[in-house]
Structure formats: structure tokens, C-alpha cells
Image (cartoon, rainbow, N blue to C red):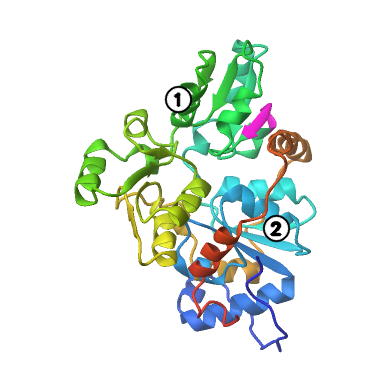
Amino acid sequence: MTLHSGTMIRPALKPLPDVLDYAALSKDELVERIRWRKAELNAVILGHNYQRVEIQEVSDYLGDSLGLSQEASDTDADVIVFCGVHFMAETAKILSPGKTVLMPDLRAGCPMADFVTGDALRKLKAEHPGAAVVAYVNSTAEVKAESTITCTSANAVRVVESIPAEQPIIFVPDRNLARYVIRETGRENIIAWDGYCYVHDDMVLEELAEARKKFPKALVVIHPEARRDLLDLADHVTSTSGMVKMAEDHDALIFGTERGLVDQLQKRYPEKTMVPLSGAAVCGNMKLNTLPKLAWSLDHQRYEVTMEEGIRVRAEEALRRMLDLSGGWNAPSKEEEELEMASVGASGCGCA
């Protein structure tokens, strides 16, 4: 869903040397620079659900990593600025090889994705010849390139069930999602990589008990990246997209996921009880992107995401297998689009 449009007259805005120079500007000045430079470059800004509100306000698209990359690939934009973490920008490049993909801060990585490298995965594959490799999309391009097929938290069970029951599976990099899939499928031949998302893995039973005591009528909905002991006590286990759908149908929910999504749902449904299981469930890597860095990135067209074409092609094959299995990509539902709009402040870029 495109959020900004209109005919504009370009002001004289020269690039500044350093991010610190941009940090000295007011929010209005930064937003103006971002808007005009974006128009000059024919660029789109992708904002992940977990980004700072100030980033969400100037984003053309909001959503999860894979959905954002697919939406951007369908636009006529020449430049994609991905405000998320590194593997997300890589996915955008994989699906849009002809576009320039930028990310404002190279330090915005994903610790879970970094648990597994291409070399380490190749070594494990050699120890288990014939095993299929299922890579969670929260993984690097090199790891995707070494994989048979990718999966999301929403379709991980379906992806695993598509693989012959007698064929061993190496599941990377999230051990918690792998354990959830093992529980749901009953398969005993899944080799789980020992990686995890610290945001979800750090949620503890005491926090769940406290939240239930405070909101006794609320259903507990937990992301499958969380630990097994929490999942066993959840009323529902679902992906972030599943949480969005549940928020539409229920009046009181406790969410075991990153605070960014919960904050969006609270704005969308102020009359409902939408609360986080843990107030500390914040991804610091996601919050590294700021308005000054975004303005600097557009002005200097940095940092560009590149990769070897052989890696890109093989990673795309693994992604396409998943998309084919799932019937392709579905555009956001009306409710998801309304949630995106609710997350974009009226001040935004100064455009409706």
C-alpha cells in the first residue's frame, strides 16, 4: 500500500557530510529531506513492524520482512531502502536483483541469523548426506543458498510436512521454531540448529504468570520462536501475521512477541486489551535505524547491499520453492492494510 504521493517542487537541499550533521536537524527538516530525496531517486522505504515509530511514519510500506520484500519487487521503484535488519535487506535484493537496495545502518544485524554460517552449514550437510535443509527466512543469503527450501513461522509446519517422512531434515537457525515443528508434526528426524531469537527466548514463565494474573480474561498468544515451556502454556501459538488476525477477533490478548507489533495493535484497537507478555521484549537491533541515518542513507545512497550472483540465484530458488508450496504471495488483507495505516502518523512525510 503506497502511503505518499503528489507533485512537488524540489527545494535546494545539499547532502551533509556526516550522520551527526543530520542528527542536528529537526524532525521536520529530516522528514522533508527524506521525502524529496526519495522522489529524486524513485525510491521506496520499507519499514518493518518492529521499527521505531519515527521510521514507520515515513515508510511507504509496513509489514514483515518477506512480505515487504515481495511488495517492493512489484513496484517500479529503482531504489529500496530497507529499515529492518541485514538479512531482510538481503532478501529484498534476492527478489529484486535489478534494484539498488540500501540499509541505513550496517550494524543492524540479527543475532539469530548469525548463529549459522554457510561454512558451518556445509559441514553439517556433509555429516548428513541426503538430508533436506529447511532455512527459516531469518537467515543470511549464503545460508538460504545452501538450503533446500525456506520457511516462515507461519508455514514452517507445512513446509516440513512437504518433505518425505523418511528424509532427515536440518532445520536452521532457530531451535525453538524447530522444536515447535517437531511437536506439531511428530517427526523425530529433524536436526535442529542451536540458534535462537534472544527477544523471544528471554521471555520467562514468571512474566507469563504475572500477565495472566493481571489480565485473567485475556488469551495468551505466543510466537513459535519462544521456548517450549512457554508455548506449552499458551492458548494459541501463531506468527505475527496470525496475531494481527487474532487481534481483530478478540477483545483481550496477551502477546508473547516483540513490543513493536503490540504497540501497533494498541493503536489500532484502543478500546481493546492488547498487552505484551514482557515489557522488555524489545529488539535493539531493529531500533538502530533512525531518521538521521535514513536521511543520510538516501543522500549518500549507502549502505548498498550486494552479493555474489551465484548465491543470490540459489537463495532465490529456496525462497521460490516455499512460495510455490504456499501458493505464492498474498497481498495484505484489508485488516492488515488498516493496521499499517493506523501505524503511520498523520504528520508522516507531510503527505496524506
Reading the image, the residue beneath label 2 is: 72
Query: The residue under label 1 is which amino acid type?
Result: Arg
Please tell me the numbered disc located at residue 154. none
User: Residue 303 location in percent, x, y?
Assistant: 62, 58
Helix, strand or loop for disc 2: helix
- Residue 312 visible in image: yes
**Quadrant of the image occupied by residue 313:** top right
User: Is residue 265 part of the magenta span, yes or no?
Assistant: no
Reading the image, the residue beneath label 1 is: 179
Between 308 and 342, the one nearer to me in the picture: 342
Above or below, 103 against 110 in this view is below
User: Residue 207 location in percent, x, y?
Assistant: 24, 43
Labelled pair 1, 2 in contact (Cβ < 8 Å): no
Above or below, 52 against 224 in this view is below
- Residue 305 visible in image: no
User: Residue 161 location in percent, x, y?
Assistant: 61, 23
Helix, strand or loop for disc 1: helix
Residue for point 31% across, 33% down: 233
Residue for point 55% across, 65% down: 338
* Magenta span of residues: 145-150
Residue for point 58% across, 81% down: 32
